[in-house]
Amino acid sequence: MSSASSPMAPPRSFIWSRRIFLTLLAGFVLVPVYVMLSSSLKPLSDVTGKFRWLPSGLTIRPYIDIWSTVPLAKYFMNSLIVSVAATVCSVVIAVFAAYAVSRYEFRGKRVFTVTVLSTQMFPGILFLLPLFLLYVNIGNATGIALFGSRGGLILTYLTFSLPFSIWMLIGYFDSVPRDLDEAALVDGCGPLGALLRVVVPAAIPGIVAVAVYAFMTAWGEVLFASVMTNDSTRTLAVGLQGYSTLNDVYWNQIMAASLVVSVPVVAGFLLLQRYLVAGLTAGAVK
Amino acid sequence: MRKNPSDPAAPGPRRRRGERIRRIGLPYLLLLPALILELLVHLVPMVIGIVMSFKELTQFYIRDWGTAPWTGFGNYKVSVDFSAPVGKSLLHSFFVTVAFTLLSVAFCWLLGTVTAIYMQDNFRGRGFLRALFLIPYALPVYAAVITWVFMFQHDNGLVNHVLHDQLHITSKPSFWLIGDNSFYALLIVHVWKGWPFAFLIVMAGLQNIPKELYEAASIDGAGMLQQIRRITLPSLRPVNQVLVLVLFLWTFNDFNTPYVLFGRAAPEAADLISVHIYQASFVTWNFGTGSAMSVLLLLFLLVVTGVYLVITSRGRRSADV
Amino acid sequence: MRSIRAAAVGAVTMSLALAATACGGGSSTGGGSNDSPKTLTYWASNQGASIAIDKKVLQPELEKFKKQTGITVKLEVVPWSDLLNRILTATTSGQGPDVLNIGNTWSASLQATGAFLPWSTANFAKIGGKDRFVDSALGSTGATGKDPAAVPLYSMAYALYYNKQIFADAGISQPPATWAEVVADGKKIEAKGKQALGAEGANVSENIHHTFVFAKQHGAEFFTADGKADFTNDGVVAAVKQYVDLMAKDKVIPVGNAEYAQNQSVSDFAKGKTAMLMWQSASANLKSQGMSESSYGIAPIPVQSGSPGTGVQTNSMVAGINLAVFKNTNNLDGSTKFVKFMTSDAEQKILNTAYSSIPPVKTAQEDTAFNTPANAVLKNTLATSAAALPQVADESQFETAVGTAVKNLFADAAAGRAVTTASVKAELEKAQQQMPAK
C-alpha cells in the first residue's frame, strides 16, 4: 500500500485559504530578509540615512570589507566545527538515551526523565559563572583545557541540546510501533541492532528535526560563547558583534556578513528537507 | 505492564542469566553518557549557583568566592521586598515576562501548527516555501535581531517609513525601541525568529499520523476542520505537550533577543527578567543577588512545569494505548 | 541493587566535584611570578574605527617591544561589549591576560576586587615615577588614599564640535559658551531646517558623563563625602533636569535621539544633519566617516556662565584609558617593562596620535603634534576644567542606575510626557535605592 498523497483532494476553500495565509506569512518572513539583502548591497550612506526600499547605488563593497573588518572566516570555521561536533555527539547520545527510556522499564526511569526535563528551566545566567569556574578547575587539575577551547564549548552546547532532544526522541520513538522492534529481534538482531536497523530509520524525521535543533542551539548561542572563548576560538554568534564598533555600526556589513554565514545553513536545511517529511513506512509490518 | 521487547524465546538458563544482566544493564549503559554530561554541565554548576545565592558575592570577593561571607536569605529578602525598588522592579519585570511569554508562545505555536497543517499535502513550491520559512530560525540571533533594530529605528527605520511616510497610518513616527511600543517590538521580533521552530517540530510530528485515519474519516463524511480537530490535534498531543512547555521555558529564560534589541538597559515596558537579572548581577558585580533572583525564577518555573505536567499527563496516559 | 549502587556512585562523584570546585575559588591568591618571562598576553580595548584597525596600530609597536626586550606579546583586541565580562571572568578564574586596558572610570570598581597590581611608589619608580603623569589623569586611577590600580594610557576629554557651514548659514559667528547661548543658537539653527544638538539618549555611559558635568556646574555631588549615594539632592536633580530639558523644554535635541545608543549622533553630525555634538575626542571617528577637519570647529563644552575652570566651571569628565596589570601574572617583570614601554614618551606620541587622544604623560603632551587646534581644546580642558568621575567601588552600579534613569527620562520626553522636577526626582530616587546599602 503506497503512502502517496491523500486520495481525497482538499476542498477549494482550503486551497484558497492556504494560498492567502502562506502568501502573507511569506511576506512577514521575507521583509527582514529583503532588508538584509538590499542593505548589504548599499553604500554606507544609504544605511545611515532614511530607509529606502531600493539602493541608491548597488555596491558589493560590503561583501569585500566584511572579511577584513572582522576575521569572519575564522569565526565561521569555529562556529562550524563547534556546531557540527556538538550536533553529532548530541544526536548520538540522545538517540541512545531516548531508546532506553522508550523501550525499557527500569528503576530510576522517571527520575531521569524528570531531571533531564527540569534542566530546561535553568536560567543561563545562574550557572554561567559556576560552569566557567568548573571548567577552569578541571583544566587546572587535569590539564585538559576546557575553558577557552572549542572542546569546552562543544561539551557545553551538546549538553544544552540534550534534554530537549531526548524528550522529543522519546516521543518520536514511542510512536514507532513495537511490532517493528519485535520483528527485528525475531530476525536475530540484538536490541541495539533493532535500534539501528528499525527504530532509527522509522524515526528519521524526528531525528533530523532534533539534529537541526541541536545545530541551531550551538550555532546561535551568545552568552556562554562570549565568556568562554578567546580571540582564536570565538564563534560567529559573538564575533558578529565586532561590526558594531566604537565609531559606527556598519549596518551594510552586518547584513552582508549575516547573509554570507546564513547561506550554508539555509542550504543545508534545503538538502535535509526531504528527510523531514519522509513518511512512516506503514506497510512494513503488515 | 509494558511488554519487554527483548524477551526472546528461552535459550539455556546460563545464557539467559548473562543476557538478563546485559538486559538490565543495557538501559543504564545507554543513559550513562547523557547522565554524566548533564551532571557536569547542568546540575553541578546549578548547585554551585544556588550556593552562591546565599553569599554576599560582590566584586570584593569575586576572586575567591569561597571566602565571601554568608548572608543567609539576605539576597532573597532584598529580591522579594516588593515595597522597595529592587523588589518592585523585579516583580514588574516578572509580570512583563509572563505576559510576553504567553503571547509569544501562543503566536509561535499557532503559526507553526497552522503552517504545518497547510503544508502537509504536496503542492507546487512546497519545498521552496519550507526552506524559506526556516530562514528566520537559521539566521544567527545577532543578525536577525540587529536587522529588526535597523527596521525599528525611529528616524531611519523601515517600519516607520511604511507606517508613517507611505501608508500614513500614524500621525508621527513612533518609537519602537524605547517607550511602551517596545513590548510589541520585542514580541514581533521574538515570534518572527521563533515560529519556524514550532513549525519544524509539528511538521515532523505530523509525519507519523497514518494517512489511513484521514481517509477513513473523510469516507465517513468528516470535513477538513473536523479532521484536524479529531485526528490531527489528538495525534499531535505528545509532541505538543513537550513543544508548548519548552517554548514557554525557553521564552521565559530568553536572554539573547532582548539583550541585542535593547542593550543592557531595557525600557520598562519590555524589561524581561533575564536581562533584568543580568543587569542586577553581572553589570553591577552583585552575583549573590543575581543568583538569588535566578533561583527564584527557577522555583517559579519548577512550579509551572509541575502544574503543567500534572494537567497534561492525565491526557497522555489515556492516549498511551 | 544496581540502581542503588549507581545512585551511590553518582552521589560520590557529585560531591567530589562539588568539593573540588568549592575549594578553589579559582585564582591563586599569591602575588605575581616570573615563570614565563618570554611571553605576555595583552588585552587592548577597541579605540580605533574597528578591531582590525586597532591591531594594525598596535602590532608594529609590539614588534618594537619584542626587539627591545625579547618578550613576545600576544595581542587580543576586545570589543567594548565584551570587555567588562571578560575582565570579570579573568578575575574570577585567575586565567586572564597579564596586561590589559580598562576604562578609567572602572578603576575604583576593579580596584575593589583586589585583582590588579597596585602601583606603589616602588612600582611607579620602575616606569619613571608618578610625576611623569598629569594630575587629572592620575585622579581617575582608583580610590583616593589608595595606590592606583592602573596607570593612565590615553586621555580624552569632551568638547563641543560644531559644523561651520550650518553656523554660517544660521548667522552664528561664535560657538556658544554658555547653555543659554546653546538654546538661543539652537533656535536659529532649527529655523534653517537643521538639527541643533545631538545626544546618545539611550547610551547609559554617555548619559552619566554629561549629567556628571551638569551636576558639577550646579555645585552638587552624586556621592557624599563618606561614599554614600545621594542622587536626590537639589543640585543633582536640577542638573539632570537641565540636561533632559534640552530635549523636553528647549527642543534643542531632537526627539529621535532618545533611542540612540550606537553613536548615531556622531553619524548625524558627520553627515551634516546636526549642527553641534558633545563628544570625546571625535576627530578620528569623524575622519573615518568622511568629514574633513576643516568643516568643523572645536570649542569647550559650555558652562552656566563665565568661562571653563574648576569647581562649578567644570565642563568635562576626565575620560581615558588606563593600563592595568593582573596581580597573578606569570611575568611580573615583563608586564612592568611593557607598561614602561607603553607610557614612554615615544610610544605615547605614536599611539595617542593614532587614536586622536591626548597623552597623560606630561612630557609627551608637550609635543607639537598635540598642539593642533583639534587637540588644543582637549588638552586645555584636561588641564584646567575636567573633573574625574567619582572613584567609588560602586561606580558600575552608579553608571547603570543613573544612566538608565536618564534614558527613561529621555524616553518620557520623546513620548511627549512632561519632565518635571518631581518626575526627575522620582527616577533618581529609584536609581539611588538600587545602590547597595552601606
Image (cartoon, coloured by chain):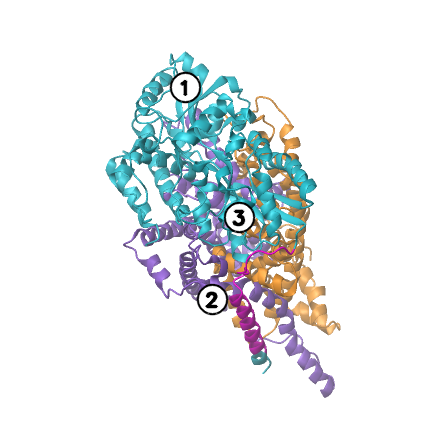
Q: Quote the CA–CA distance across marks 2 and 3.
A: 68 Å
Which span of residues is magenta-colored? C6-35
x and y percentages locating residue C411 in the rendered image: 35, 36
Q: Quote the CA–CA distance across marks 3 and 1.
A: 53 Å
x and y percentages locating residue A282 in the rendered image: 66, 60
State the predominant SS element of the stretch in magenta. helix
- Which label belongs to residue B78? none
Crowd around label 3: few <14 · some 14–19 · many ≥20 (10 Å): some
Q: Which chain is orange?
A: A
- Which type of secondary structure does the marked residue at label 2 adopt? helix
Check if mark 3 and mark 1 are on a common chain: yes
Colour in which chain B is shown? purple
- Which label belongs to residue C123? 3
- Which type of secondary structure does the marked residue at label 1 adopt? loop
Q: Chain of mark 1?
A: C
| Amino acid beneath label 2 | Ser
| Amino acid beneath label 1 | Lys
Q: Nearer the viewer, mark 1 or mark 2?
A: 1
Q: Which chain is cyan?
A: C
Seen from the viewer's position, the closer of residues A42 and C150 is: C150
